[in-house]
Image (tube, rainbow, N blue to C red):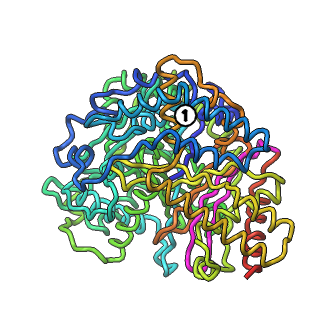
Amino acid sequence: ETPCVQDHAMPVLRPLEPVRAVLRFLWSPIRKLRQRIRKSRGPIRNMAALPPTVQKIINDNVYGLPRLPINPLGDTLERYLTSVKPLCTPDEYAAQEKLCAEFQNGVGAQLHADLVSEDAHEGYPFSFIEKHWDVMYNGLRCPAPVNISPFFAINDEKDAKDMVQCARAAKFVHGFTRWTRKVLAGELEQDKDMCSHAYPKHFSSAKIPVKGMDELAMYPDSRHITVISNGNVFTLEIVSLEGTILEVTGIQAKLEDIVKRAHAEGAGSLPILTAEDRDVWADARASLEAVDGNKDKLQAIDAGIIAVCLDESPVKAGDLHERAQNLLVGPGSNRWWDKQQLVVDGSGFMGIVFEHSYGDGTNWGRFINDVMADVEGKLAVMATHEASAASDAVHVTLTVPASVQSTIDAAKANYRKLQDDISIEVLDFSSFGKDEIKTWNCSPDAVLQLAFQAAYFSLHNKMPPVYEACATRKFFHGRTETIRACTEASTAFCKALVSKAPKEEAVALMQSAAKTHSAISKAAAGGMGIDRHLTAMANNAAAKGMATPALFADAKFQYAKNWLLSTSNGSGPFLAMFGFAAVIPEGYGLGYLIENKKVNIVCTCFNSCKDTDAKKMAASIANTLNAMCALK
């Protein structure tokens, strides 16, 4: 999971102003949360219409998982103080201690008690943070690309001759559709001791733009996919009324036909609207739906089991930078950002671009693993039908009013600004991987986190606030928590490494810092993090119209969650890259995969920030990893 959310000022995109607004969104009194969420059903607009099997997966705690705990206020504040100490001078830390004591003995005690009371109920929200998280994701008005759409790149085929666009897309679509049938039938094997409630939201669904607060629409009975080629949108039925799935060769033939038809039609541009500010897109969609026939067509796009984006061939096949760029900010008119998207370019390179509002990295990794295992023939056979028994794809054409055409033209310009501001550098570090790191008596993830911090320190001569995402799926409806990875121990190690301290001293500090990191990671995953607790209390204070508590208004408190490094470990089978954008103007985004013999890191920042440089950061990380290896 990654916190890639920002808030862009509109109607003119200003890509670097936005980000602080999202941080303010989480902590300031401008959001009346209790008025912004539909208490009876949460953010799913058609929950009551969903089949019982789907409602059961979402609403019933079938695995008997515990509820996400609300920790004692004193414990949360103590952990907060530990996390903020390396970012403070002694005087600043003393001020933080005073603020925490005042909060605990004052307004904080009531906010905590109210949160505990509010959480003592059945049904939605299923945890103390779920309502706030849903409101945050659905209430953000910034565009989806860059802000809330991370990506996974999938490994190439072992044989180059199998890198064929429509053939690869067809295999994945077939496997993904099979996977969705298992979910719908309630037959998906549980991730050990982990919640599965999010899986039905990952297919046959779309985030619908609504002024002020988006909604999730789910269509589990859908039997078609949405396909976009050359900016033209098609629907293709791949599940028969009898429940059989179109065979792989049949899907491939239909996709190839779509590509031909799309290029014969000429370039389309309607999908670029999904890349706009959410209120702008909501207004445009309302105007489109006012035209007879358009509403049903838009719903057909939304209902697709998955959106398949068939892109043109790359300028340089195999180039990692171009691949990452295409997944993060690829052709805006060939995406439907409201949905989960399979992107396959003309060279056969393939990746998934995610709509982050309803799921996180471990969900995505699971379905990619299952689907790719299916592609390799490792799962049971399911009934199929031949292409001759399938309908041809339907070209979805809407009547576009002049006012919406103007919005499309503006959306293209805004998206180009967003593309131009993103800087991406891919570090495919092959000197060693987790096999080597384990010989250092350190966790591989901890070593990467130390390398990121030391690399930043060597470039900027200061320690950064660091967000590392971790899953809390061992709890019912659990999603994520923050690992505040910058610690006193990591600070001591980074300073020792950069100053070239004696090897024995540096090794001892590295192992101590790695042990500390593993401990705080385990605590966060076990429901003992701090950020979700603090966020819920701050939001409730805002909803009650209270003055912002002094602790939450404090500049150092705010700085400590100004994530100069936003990081996430997406390691898993079949994956080649994992990437997302930085979450503040002066920050870096670091998505990474740790393999046995190598590490892949996608480093992002914003070109309009003079203080950051993705190439320099990636080089600094490589140098730091090599320096750490030299300590052994």
Amino acid type indicated by mark 1: Glu
> Would residue 333 be seen by someone viewing this image from the given angle?
no
- Which percent across, then down, holds residue 586? 74, 44
The residues colored magenta run 587-610
Does 591 appear in magenta? yes
509 or 293: nearer the eye?
509
In which quarter of the view is residue 135 placed? Answer: top left
Q: In this rendering, is residue 32 above or below 574?
A: above
- Which percent across, then down, holds residue 163? 49, 73
Q: For the view shown, which residue lies furthest in the left direction?
A: 242
Q: In this rendering, is residue 253 above or below 545?
A: below
> Would residue 564 be seen by someone viewing this image from the given angle?
yes
Q: In this rendering, is residue 595 above or below 32?
A: below
Residue at (26, 37) in percent of width and height: 123
Q: Main secondary structure of the magenta part?
A: strand
213 or 226: nearer the eye?
213
Residue at (44, 41) in percent of width and height: 338
Which residue is identified by label 1?
276
Label 1 Cα crowd, 10 Å radius (few <14 / some 14-19 / many 20+) = many
Q: For the view shown, which residue lies furthest in the right direction?
A: 499
